[in-house]
């Protein structure tokens, strides 16, 4: 059985080579980063993580109650929690004023929640 390299495999190996070259070139930056990690205050870092978790939890509860109030649909907390985290990530990497996060919220809650309700929920979340 002869296996030929597919285009996806070629891209994978090319990216692997690029990452390796990048790491070799910037090795001194990795040493500085490891020194920075060694000097972190673990208490402050854990406090930040706890605050972020409760921020996501509060956002999830907001969307959950909003959808239940205006659309009458209840979406599971776990699904909405993951949606909230992904939506925050999308809004961070694609700074479009929340438009990309709104479109993700619409797609993630599509069968249970109407697009208009999800859009209004996102807009009112920004206003709040």
Image (cartoon, helix red, strand yellow):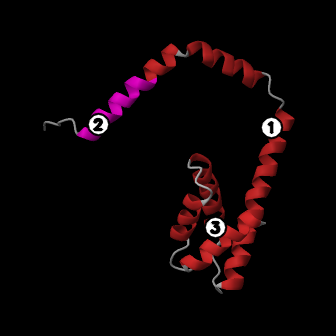
Q: Secondary structure at mark 3?
A: helix
Circle 3/circle 2 CB separation < 8 Å: no
Asked if residue 66 is positioned above or below residue 46 in the image, the reply reads below
Circle 1 Cα neighbour tier, 10 Å, few/some/many (<14 / 14–19 / ≥20): few
Q: Which residue is mark 2?
A: 9
Q: Where residue 63 sits in the image (x, y, percent)?
A: 69, 71
Residue drawn at point x = 28 percent, y = 33 percent = 10
- Does residue 12 appear left or right of residue 111 in this picture? left
* Image quadrant occupied by the N terminus: top left
- Reply yes or no: does residue 61 show up in magenta: no
Asked if residue 20 is positioned above or below residue 61 in the image, the reply reads above
Looking at the image, is mark 3 or mark 1 earlier in the sequence? 1
* Image quadrant occupied by the C terminus: bottom right
Which residues fall within the magenta stretch? 7-19
Residue drawn at point x = 54 percent, y = 68 percent = 108
Q: CA distance from mark 2 to mark 1?
A: 38 Å
Asked if residue 70 is positioned above or below residue 96 in the image, the reply reads below
Q: Which residue is mark 1?
A: 45
Q: Where residue 3 sits in the image (x, y, percent)?
A: 17, 37
Q: Which residue is mark 3?
A: 80
Main SS, magenta residues:
helix
Q: CA distance from mark 3 to mark 2?
A: 35 Å
- Does residue 73 appear left or right of residue 19 in this picture? right
Residue 19 falls in which quadrant of the image? top left
């Amino acid at each position: 059985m002869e296996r030929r390299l597919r285009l996806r495999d070629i891209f994978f190996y090319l990216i692997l080579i690029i990452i390796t070259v990048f790491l070799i070139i910037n090795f001194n930056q990795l040493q500085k980063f490891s020194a920075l990690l060694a000097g972190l205050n673990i208490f402050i870092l854990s406090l930040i993580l706890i605050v972020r978790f409760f921020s996501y939890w509060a956002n999830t509860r907001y969307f959950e109650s909003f959808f239940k109030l205006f659309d009458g649909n209840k979406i599971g907390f776990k699904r909405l929690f993951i949606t909230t985290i992904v939506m925050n990530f999308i809004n961070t990497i694609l700074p479009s004023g929340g438009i990309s996060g709104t479109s993700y919220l619409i797609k993630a809650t599509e069968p249970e929640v109407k697009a208009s309700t999800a859009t209004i929920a996102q807009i009112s979340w920004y206003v709040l």
